[in-house]
Image (spheres, rainbow, N blue to C red):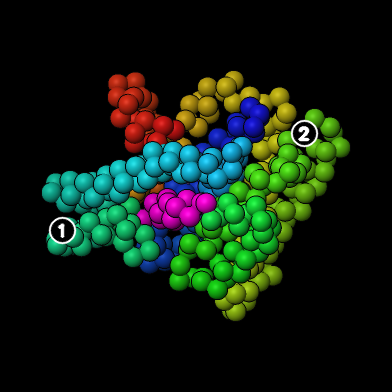
Amino acid sequence: MNQYLSDKFRVISLLSAILVLYIHSGFHDNEIQGMPINHITQNVISGSLGSMAVPVFYILSGFLFFLKVPSGMLSIFQKMRKRIHTILIPYLIGCTFCLLFFIATATLPGVSRFMNGEFSLLSLPLPELLWTTFVGEGHPLAFQLWFLQDLIVIVAFAPLLYIALTRMKWAFAILAFVASIATSPTTSIATSLFWFSLGGLIALSPSRDKIINLEISKSRNLLNRRNILITSCLTFVIMPLLVKDVEIQWLSHSFRMLRIFLGIVSIWLLYDVFAGIDFKLSNNHILSTACNYSFFIYLFHVPTLNVPRKIIVAILGKTSFGYLTSYLLSPFIFATVAIIIGILLRRYANKLFCIMTGGR
């Protein structure tokens, strides 16, 4: 993997993390009732653009997991062992942080009003509280970590997945897609497996470089990318209008998956069009620094994102302007504070930071 692709992964990962923040900074319908601008803004950013964020994480995770497995199954087991430090331990730390944060805010008078959370959970018996914190019903207490929860399960079966991907190849992706339709919306694991497998298949494919289209120096190739980009973007925007009345579950899910795929293609090509072949992330200090903390931002934004989110509303009032300003600014305020905290941790407690983020 060359430096251009590595930079591309880092920038797209940061963008996806910011989109996840937007998903979780949105306000409920009853809070913004009668505020059409707020509804439209949240639907476009969180509902449409945000739907691509987690699938991007899975595709990149699958690609990096199955990239460079020279010794076959032995390499798979080595990568599984490494994921204990890069996925499992951060997951446990993130869940623990969420529980401790709830305990702290519940004991400080006047602070809980700036938080969303089921504080009644803290009165549960210890075994039930631990189950809710680390496993839960579909997601742990830190609900954003459902992505890592599914990823841990997928990686646990990585040897079987490796056999399936190498023998069945793209047929397995079709099978995973069908399984995602059959299990939606009751569970997410099949859908997660589909996106992860898609990244793995690209990494294992002999035509990997052609698929991800690393060679962008030719103007004709760049023109083709722009044509594909325009087509993908237009389809991504128009598709909801064409299928808005579809009530059949499997058909609706299929259209949603297709739309997410087109959105990911659009993001992938947008980077090339706007960054250009000569772009080097190391030359942009601010963006390069921010990219170092994408996982840290994702890992600890629940429930802490609620702090700037609710403070802004408390200052500006529960109006359309107050809610809209909070929604648009909270992700960037939180990300900035998280990056500053991350920089300080790296400087004064680097070992702790590495454990918390799995060395990212």
Specify few, some or many for label 2: CA neighbours under 10 Å numbering under 14, 14-19, or 20 or more: few
Please tell me in which quadrant of the rendered image residue 7 appears: top right
Q: Residue furthest right?
A: 220
Q: Quadrant of the C terminus?
A: top left
Above/below status of 322 relative to 69: below
Secondary structure at badge 1 equals: helix
Q: Residue furthest bottom?
A: 248
Count all numbered tags in the image, as a single digit: 2
- Work out whether residue 331 can be spotted: no
Residue drawn at 51 percent across, 51 percent down: 158
Residue drawn at 63 percent across, 74 percent down: 251
Instruction: Report the amino acid beneath label 2.
Output: Glu
* Residue 254 painted magenta: no
| Front-most of residues 139 and 321 | 139
Q: Position of residue 255 (x, y in %)?
A: 64, 67
Q: Position of residue 22 (x, y in %)?
A: 46, 49
Label 1: which residue?
126
Instruction: Report the amino acid beneath label 1.
Output: Leu
Q: For the stretch drawn in magenta, what is the main secondary structure?
A: helix
Specify few, some or many for label 1: CA neighbours under 10 Å numbering under 14, 14-19, or 20 or more: few
| Front-most of residues 217 and 79 | 79
Left or right of residue 5, residue 105 in this image: left
Above/below status of 3 relative to 52: above
Tag 1 near tag 2, CB within 8 Å: no
Magenta stretch: give its range: 143-159
| Front-most of residues 316 and 118 | 118
Label 2: which residue?
215
Disc 1 to disc 2, C-alpha distance = 56 Å
* Residue 157 painted magenta: yes
Q: Position of residue 350 (x, y in %)?
A: 34, 24
- Work out whether residue 80 can be spotted: yes
